[in-house]
Amino acid sequence: MDRCIVLVDAGYLLGAAATLLTGDAARSRLAIDHAGLIQQIRERAQTETGQPLLRLYWFDGAPDRVPQPEHRRLRVMPRVTVRLGMLTRVAGRVQQKGVDAAMHAQLTELARHKATSDIVLITGDGDLLPGMMAAKEHGVAIHLWAVQAADGAYNQSEDLIAEADERQLLDRAWLTRVITAAEPSLLDVPVQTAPEPPPAPACPPRAPHPVAARTPTPSDLARSAPVALRWSSDTGWIDPDDDIPLLETLTNARQAWEDREQDLAVGGEPHEVGKIFAARWMERLRPHDQAANHLAQLVQAHPRIPRSLDSELLRYAARFGTIGHEELAISNKHRVLLREGFWDGIEQLNKTSAPTP
């Protein structure tokens, strides 16, 4: 059938939106225009799939599966069907039960009966992977939509991302047309009290004793030697360099999402990872007001990568299981290869961007 269907995991959509907009996953912190939200989803789904909407399924949890006011508003809207799972509290945290199973069953049934040609999934739950794979086997195109993550990374299962046919981002600008942070009530505003004056000192403070400068040890000197790429961000005798802009600060939300999409095709070889990181940093540094100064500062430090930037390189490399599962688990051999790849990338980009005589 040439039509599209949308399956919405409300817990994911609204929880991720609350985290992005308020820093807290609680939906109570949001003001939601549900009619506007449904209309936005409908229009975008029809535009991106090129098919008319058959139906939107809204999956959510509710205490004892009793519809809440928002569910009552939603289920009377045209082409909207609400499916409710249980909402329970475990160890002080509210959890949904049965929502992912209901979504999985609906996804597979729609595909098996060939009720649609395109299904839009708004979810991050990896438990839907088998249903997604089964739907694809029945000839259904799967469009996976992600809510912009508060930390710039992903808030979806990597397996879902890899299996989807098409992927789109619901960014802050799109969300805030219909979802905003709720105004705090008067009870939430803390009472401001005048600070108490500090007690008067019993006696004048003593001048601190001068501290002798620490003499660097042979190990310190080895770590700062030009040939020791392995020590770039380890503790040692190095100058502070926190004014070097990080890739994270130079990257907007859409670029961060696109980076993670591209990283899915990266093999994870350390030298390659270092070059990719360098390319992104150089590309996004160029519009910066102090780009020339920062680049000169970087080149002057060669072959050592400034500490803050190098630490970010290691954190980035830790995404790839072939390199390490966390920054501290990366072997010294891989650290050297990462940094060599970084410098090769910087040198290559400098040559291609340098003006020809």
Image: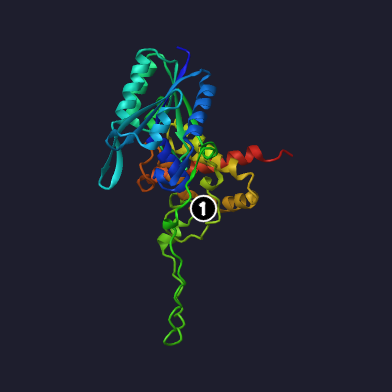
Choose top left, top right, bottom left or bottom right for residue 54.
top left
Comparing 164 with 303, the one in front is 164
Comparing 347 with 25, the one in front is 25
Residue type at mark 1 is Pro
Farthest residue to the left: give it: 91
**Quadrant (top left/top right/bottom left/bottom right) for the N terminus:** top left
Residue 78 appears left or right of 82: right
Q: How many marks?
A: 1
Query: Eyeballing the image, is 205 above or below 253?
Result: below
- Tell me residue 110's x, y (percent): 37, 17
Query: Eyeballing the image, is 43 above or below 256?
Result: above
Label 1 crowd bin: few (<14), some (14–19), many (20+), radius 10 Å:
many
- Tell me residue 31's x, y (percent): 47, 43
Query: Eyeballing the image, is 98 above or below 193?
Result: above
Q: In this view of the protein, can residue 328 be seen by the observer?
A: yes
Residue named by callout 1: 306
Residue 66 appears left or right of 323: left
- Tell me residue 157's x, y (percent): 37, 33
**Quadrant (top left/top right/bottom left/bottom right) for the C terminus:** top right
Q: Residue at x 47, y 32 (%)?
A: 261
Q: Which residue is drawn at 43% across and 87% down?
A: 203
- Tell me residue 105's x, y (percent): 31, 22
Farthest residue to the right: give it: 357
Q: Residue at x 47, y 34 (%)?
A: 34
Instruction: Identify the secondary structure beneath mark 1.
Output: loop
Query: Eyeballing the image, is 85 above or below 27?
Result: above
- Is the image coloured rainbow, by chain, by secondary structure, or in one colour? rainbow
Q: In this view of the protein, can residue 150 be seen by the observer?
A: no
Choose top left, top right, bottom left or bottom right for residue 122.
top left
Q: Residue at x 59, y 40 (%)?
A: 283
Comparing 158 with 224, the one in front is 158
